[in-house]
Amino acid sequence: MSHYKAKFASFGMHVPKKVVNNFDLEKIVDTTDEWIRTRTGMFERHHCTKDEAATDIAVVAATKAIESSQVKYKDIDLIITATVTGDYNFPSASCILQKRLGLGRIPAFDISAGCTGFVYALDMAKQYVENGTKQNVLVTGVDILTKITNWKDRGTCVLFGDGAGSTIVTRAERSDISEIMDSITFADGSLGDLLIQEGGGSRRPASHETVDQNLHTIYMEGNKIYRHAIKSMQASTEELLKRNKMTARDVDWVIPHQANLRIIEGLADKLRVPMDKVIVNIEKYGNTSSATIPMAMAEAVGSSKIRRGDIILLTSFGAGLTWGSILARY
Ligand code: UT7
């Protein structure tokens, strides 16, 4: 039994300045604008420069989220960041964000759940707020996958962009219409090899050999993940809706992970949700991993497409493999 309700106070997003479109990629690998558009729905993505790292963009997204909420900096009492590409293996991106935002000695930690990271982080933040332990949690999804991209692998290098999105999960009054109603998360570690960065961990520490073999870059079996993606997001969404005695017809907006437009359309079809209720911005940003959902939320809230009181459904899948969904009234 939860003591309190949790809600989204606000969202903020940020991407690096440098824009790389499909025609730019044609000059790097054997690909075409036509292939990328028709197979993925992507056209542009933003890339960090050599000197930019995860917290450089996360700090801007977090600042926007904080300043567009009623929450004061001094009242934030926990930081959770979803990322697989923090500035360093350690310390965590959350600890660096705490320092850069001047947030005092509040607890701060990162979680690793690939592209599902933001959904996992929200699931946690919601519980901290509901049980009364924390009141205002800064939750960020940030990934700089272009720093771990294999630029010789056309099957992956065209897909990823860099970005950050943040929200404040805050305590809601009982009378408040806004609420994070429910969340559900899953993992299947037996499928971990389908999407993996093999080098740089304790199994294959960095060495000349691991660098020569490109083991510090992303290895992905795209079409195996593709098949799993639609099924897993559909199953977690349907289970979540069912236990809340709702159907997809009750949902005003679906905000899915932006990995591939065909996956998004396939999911909408399975859920029988028309595409005009699905938030899509993949053509502008590509796949920004844990940042896709908070970035899409920040844009949709910023343009008043999503309004207070709307029922929203966030759903994602990613490395692990992991997947999950969040049901909320914004
Ligand atoms: O966020 C979670 C991370 N994971 C994902 O998002 C992965 C989800 N998977 C996907 O989005 C899709 O599987 C991809 C976009 C990665 C690939 O699309 P696909 O329709 O599954 O293509 P495929 O891998 O089956 O490859 C089809 C063909 C192959 O050529 P052949 O063997 O048929 O001659 C590939 O070599 O397309 C070729 N291909 C390309 N051609 C031009 C693969 N990448 C490219 C490319 N440009 N960039």
Image (spheres, rainbow, N blue to C red):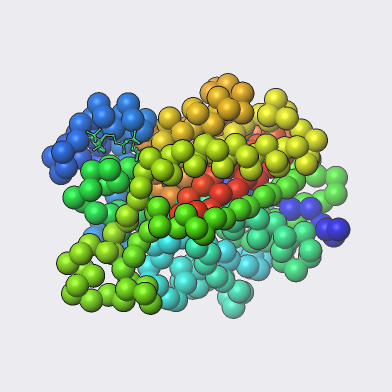
Report the front residue among 233 and 161: 233
Q: Quadrant of the N terminus?
A: bottom right
272 sits left or right of 262 in the view: right
Most distant residue in the front direction: 190
327 sits left or right of 226 in the view: right
- Residue sitting at 27 percent across and 64 percent down? 215
272 sits left or right of 286 in the view: right
Report the front residue among 214 and 228: 228
Residue 162: x and y in percent read 36, 50
- Residue sitting at 41 percent across and 36 percent down? 260
Quick check: can you spot residue 178? yes
Residue 114: x and y in percent read 47, 56
Count of all numbered marks drawn on residues in the image: 0
Q: In the rendered view, would you say 262 is above or below 237? A: above
Q: Quadrant of the C terminus?
A: top right
309 sits left or right of 305 in the view: right
Q: In the rendered view, would you say 25 is above or below 269? A: below
Quick check: can you spot residue 166? no
Residue 178: x and y in percent read 74, 43
